[in-house]
Amino acid sequence: MIWVAIAGLGLLLIGVPVAFSLGLAGLVGVWIADIPFSIVATRLFTGVDSFVFLAVPFYILAAEIMSQGGITTRLISIASGATRWLRGGTAYANIGTSVLFAGISGSAVADAAALGRVFMQEMPKEGYTRPYAAAVTVASSIIGPIIPPSGLAILIGAVTGVSIIDLFLAGVGPGLLLGLACAGVVFIGALRGKLPKPRIGESSQSRVRMIVEGMAVATLPFIIVGGMVLGAYTATEGGGIAVAYAIFLSVVVFRKMDMAGLWQAFMRAARTSATIYLLVAAATILSYALNLLGISGFVRDAAMIFEGQPLNFLFALAVLMLILGTFLDIGAAILIFMPLIMPAAAALGIDPLQASMVVVVTLAIGLVTPPVGVVLFVVMRVGNIRMIPLMRALVPFLLAQLVAVVILCLVPEISTWLPKVLNP
């Protein structure tokens, strides 16, 4: 197994794309296990041959359409209106918009790119430093892949068999907890008088119109999750409904997207989906090779160290995922490690939803930490800001989010309460 790890990490370090690094490392494992390479082709296709994975392109397409269809500006107006009277109100609005946007995009990168362009222009005009504006954007953007609809939840459900409906519902509590952690940092800064009061003018829209449009946007996650909870449709069918609703809002209601824009959204969603499917197929090869080489037994033996100590296991899991998240793609980490982690967690009596949320949240924090902090680099590019000043401003938010991870480990109900109530 050590040679497989060396091959994979070595390829990543020299700049080989993640999917190809995983696939080639898997080939090394297959070769070491003395298995015919012809099996690789079969495994590539079986890795993506899942009805659950059909949901991924739908949710990506819905997010592309909604993010281009005038949705972002409406969400910002709603959040800004709610926090206009607070010191540090625009920073709160940044966080609140990320929570709302998470229910549409399900992507930290999309959140950072879309909201960063707006807030990193407006917040310095009010007196915020550029690093602080960037730090709020970076820290709050990782809520995107946690609150439903979440593409990561679909990946976890596909590789572990855990209910996607339950995973969607389980993400609500941890996502809001991360939002509260970020808001807590802003609150402390406001108490110390370091943050300005908002100077954003009133929206040209009437308040009633803003509320109506906000409700129309906010209904999307409720349509997706609500229909699944009621048993009206599956996660995949819900994705198709989300696309239809997104087109209706963007083209018919808001009239911010024409056919050319819709075609561009389809093309971008197709490219993103193809990237994910390639990653899934490559990770399947690597997982197959690692299982051939006995990694399941290794993980099982390692988990025995924590027998009777499930909390210590969760803390160790969180630390491991924080480390992996700093240099490994979040989707790849889930595809490789979740099938190994879940049996060990179940053996220790840990609820699979809590274990899943600990993994997702800690890996998401890896999106904002170097050397592979994708969100970090997106905001640096959007805001034209250097890493060192940004990281200094980001440290308090990261510490608050680590406290949130500890709370998530200590209180399983944050992840399990809503699924038990709405989908018993």
Image: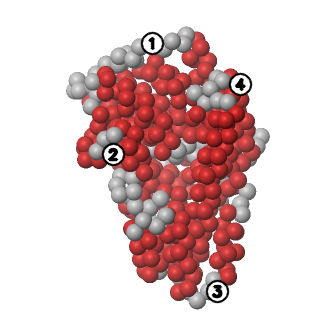
Q: Position of residue 42 (x, y in %)?
A: 70, 75
- Disc nearer the start of the sequence (4/3): 3
Kindly identify which residue carries mark 2: 398
Three-letter code, disc 1: Glu
Height in image: 10 above or below 261?
below
Lateral position of residue 386 relative to residue 328, left or right:
left
Name the one closer to the observer, 19 or 159. Answer: 19
Give the left or right position of residue 380, taking residue 239 as reference. Answer: left
Most extreme residue toward the right is 232
- Tell me which residue sits at (52%, 44%) in the image: 107
Rate crowding at label 4 as few (under 14), some (14 to 19) or many (20 or more) other CA atoms within 10 Å: few
Say few, some or many: other residues with alpha carbon within 10 Å of mark 1 (under 14 / 14 to 19 / 20 or more): few
Label 2 amino acid?
A: Leu
For residue 46, the mark is none
The CA distance from mark 4 to mark 1 is 26 Å
Q: Which residue is mark 1?
A: 202
Disc 2/disc 1 C-alpha distance (Å): 32 Å
Determine whether the residue tagged by mark 1 lies in a helix, strand or loop: loop
Q: Can I make out residue 97 in this image?
A: yes
Instruction: Tell me the tag on residue 252.
Output: 4
Disc 1 or 3, which lies upstream in sequence?
Answer: 3
Q: Amino acid at mark 4?
A: Val
Q: Position of residue 423 (x, y in %)?
A: 66, 43
Crowding at mark 3 (Cα within 10 Å: few <14, some 14-19, many 20+): few
- The residue located at (51%, 12%) in the rendering is 204
Q: Nearer the viewer, mark 2 or mark 1?
A: 1
| Rendered location of residue 196, percent (x, y) | 28, 22
Q: Amino acid at mark 3?
A: Pro
- Pointers 4 and 3 in contact (C-beta within 8 Å): no
Q: Which is nearer the eye, 364 or 16?
A: 16
Give the secondary structure at mark 3: loop
